[in-house]
Image (cartoon, rainbow, N blue to C red):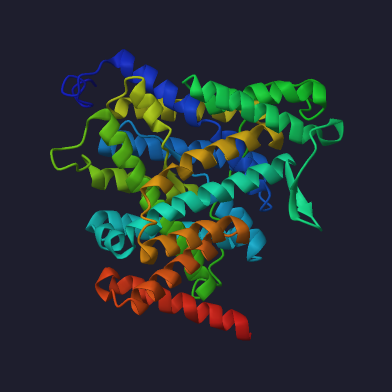
């Protein structure tokens, strides 16, 4: 085992790998509560999504362990599940089966891209600043969702949006605010698993407020519910709407994964002298296989989690840490009732805080150059204010093409980006005249 995972070569031990794997699980296991909570708002059954989340995370993380030998864990991604529910299902009026079909097709294409290296061509076609802006925009989008789910933010006829009063009439908002404070304190003190611990403590705090309800005869153990199997709808697969949904999943998943893999590899000191990720093809393939498995089981896009860096900080350097994390996801299958206790007020602080983690890349965007900064700004602004990731990407790509066109900076725009801009403009015209 130590020889297969190259313990000696990477200067690690079995003990460090186990601690690293457990730390990564603690840091990201909040997704077991948050993902079913978000997808249930799309009409999916909470318990079935919980099972799909656990199994797809375990499958993808095991593939990462054995195909890439990297201490990176995967699970259904935040932002991608929000896009699935609030943009595709609620915003566009599509069925969750339609959304799962887009996830499946995206995963299958991602497998092909991983095998043949086409991902490099796609990466080069999308402007670097827009890639960073997408992450920031999704972060703000997730933050608003968290604020709304907690009851902290609500609509107002005079100001469009307002904050709740933190009193007994807004118990959910008060509990969520306390939970956010707890999470922030734990994070700045560098407590491993700060987000998960924050969710647990917020759930406990919610009991005296009546926000958390413990049923009579409660037991934390239960037989896992059956996940959804092959619930797809291919009837609209040739529509422009399907293309936009599919492309958004593909685009976000592709760059989230590459960014996370690079970040974890750099932190672990595993990149080569040219800064390349070891076994990158296997790592990207793990992401793609996890996405396909997740779609077949009934969950949104599976992606690499940046929380894997917490495991690396605890000593993880090989794929064995990923084996440990995957095993813990399978154990969690039998703790379904425990996660079902967690109210939206307890998961909302996690959403808000992950929003902060995703917006950190804003400092890397070149706002001094208007043809780069304006499209990035529109991408970031449109996502939360339109409650749609897709619209943010559409406005970002169109404005980027226009800015480069009028300044005659044609060489800055990849051919594929021109094509995407034309397609998106055609869609806006179609929406306006229909």
Residue 108 higher or lower than 336, as above or below: below
Between residue 273 and residue 101, name the one nearer to us. 273
Residue 72 is drawn in which quadrant?
top left
Q: Name which residue lies at 46% across and 38% down.
A: 57
Q: Residue furthest bottom?
A: 433
Q: Residue furthest front?
A: 368
Q: Name which residue lies at 22% across and 32% down.
A: 270
Between residue 345 and residue 99, name the one nearer to us. 345
Residue 195 higher or lower than 153, as above or below: above
Which image quadrant: the C terminus?
bottom right
* Residue 266 visible in the current orientation: yes
Q: Residue furthest top?
A: 15
Residue 203 is drawn in which quadrant?
top right
Which image quadrant: the N terminus?
top left
Q: Name which residue lies at 33% across and 57% down.
A: 128
Q: Name which residue lies at 53% across and 68% down.
A: 234
Between residue 248 and residue 55, name the one nearer to us. 248
Between residue 279 and residue 356, name the one nearer to us. 356
* Residue 231 visible in the current orientation: no
Residue 7 is drawn in which quadrant?
top left
Locate residue 384, reporting x and y percent: 59, 55
Locate residue 377, reporting x and y percent: 47, 59
Horizontal arrangement in the rendering, residue 123 relative to residue 393 (left or right):
left
């Amino acid at each position: 085992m130590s020889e297969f995972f190259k313990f000696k070569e990477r200067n690690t031990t079995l003990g460090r790998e186990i601690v690293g794997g457990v730390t990564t699980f603690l840091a990201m296991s909040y997704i077991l509560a948050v993902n079913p909570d978000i997808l249930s708002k799309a009409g999916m059954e909470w318990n079935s999504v919980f099972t799909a989340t656990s199994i797809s995370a375990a499958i993808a993380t095991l593939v990462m362990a054995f195909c890439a030998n990297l201490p990176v864990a995967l699970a259904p991604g935040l932002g991608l599940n929000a896009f699935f529910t609030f943009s595709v299902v609620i915003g566009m009026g599509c069925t969750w089966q339609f959304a799962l079909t887009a996830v499946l097709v995206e995963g299958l294409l991602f497998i092909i891209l991983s095998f043949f290296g086409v991902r490099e061509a796609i990466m080069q076609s999308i402007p670097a600043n827009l890639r960073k802006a997408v992450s920031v925009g999704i972060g703000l989008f997730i933050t608003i969702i968290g604020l709304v789910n907690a009851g902290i933010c609500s609509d107002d006829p005079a100001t469009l949006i307002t904050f709740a009063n933190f009193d007994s009439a807004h118990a959910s908002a008060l509990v969520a605010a306390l939970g956010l404070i707890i999470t922030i304190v734990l994070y700045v003190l560098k407590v491993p698993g700060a987000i998960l611990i924050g969710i647990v403590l917020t759930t406990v705090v919610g009991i005296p407020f009546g926000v958390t309800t413990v049923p009579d005869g409660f037991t934390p153990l239960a037989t896992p519910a059956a996940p959804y199997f092959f619930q797809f709808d291919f009837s609209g697969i040739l529509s422009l709407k399907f293309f936009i949904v599919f492309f958004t999943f593909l685009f976000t998943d592709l760059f989230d994964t590459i960014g996370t893999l690079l970040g974890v590899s750099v932190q672990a000191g595993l990149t080569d002298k040219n800064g390349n990720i070891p076994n990158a093809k296997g790592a990207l393939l793990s992401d793609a296989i996890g996405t396909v498995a997740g779609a077949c089981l009934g969950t949104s896009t599976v992606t690499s989690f940046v929380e894997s860096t917490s495991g690396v900080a605890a000593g993880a350097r090989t794929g064995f840490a990923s084996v440990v994390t995957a095993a813990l996801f399978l154990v969690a299958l039998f703790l379904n009732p425990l996660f079902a206790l967690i109210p939206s007020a307890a998961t909302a602080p996690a959403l808000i805080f992950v929003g902060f983690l995703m917006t950190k890349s804003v400092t890397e965007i070149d706002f001094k150059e208007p043809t780069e900064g304006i499209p990035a700004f529109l991408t970031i602004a449109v996502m939360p204010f339109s409650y749609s990731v897709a619209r943010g990407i559409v406005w970002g790509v169109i404005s980027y093409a226009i800015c480069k066109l009028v300044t005659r900076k044609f060489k800055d725009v990849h051919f594929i980006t021109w094509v995407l801009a034309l397609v998106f403009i055609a869609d806006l015209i179609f929406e306006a005249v229909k």
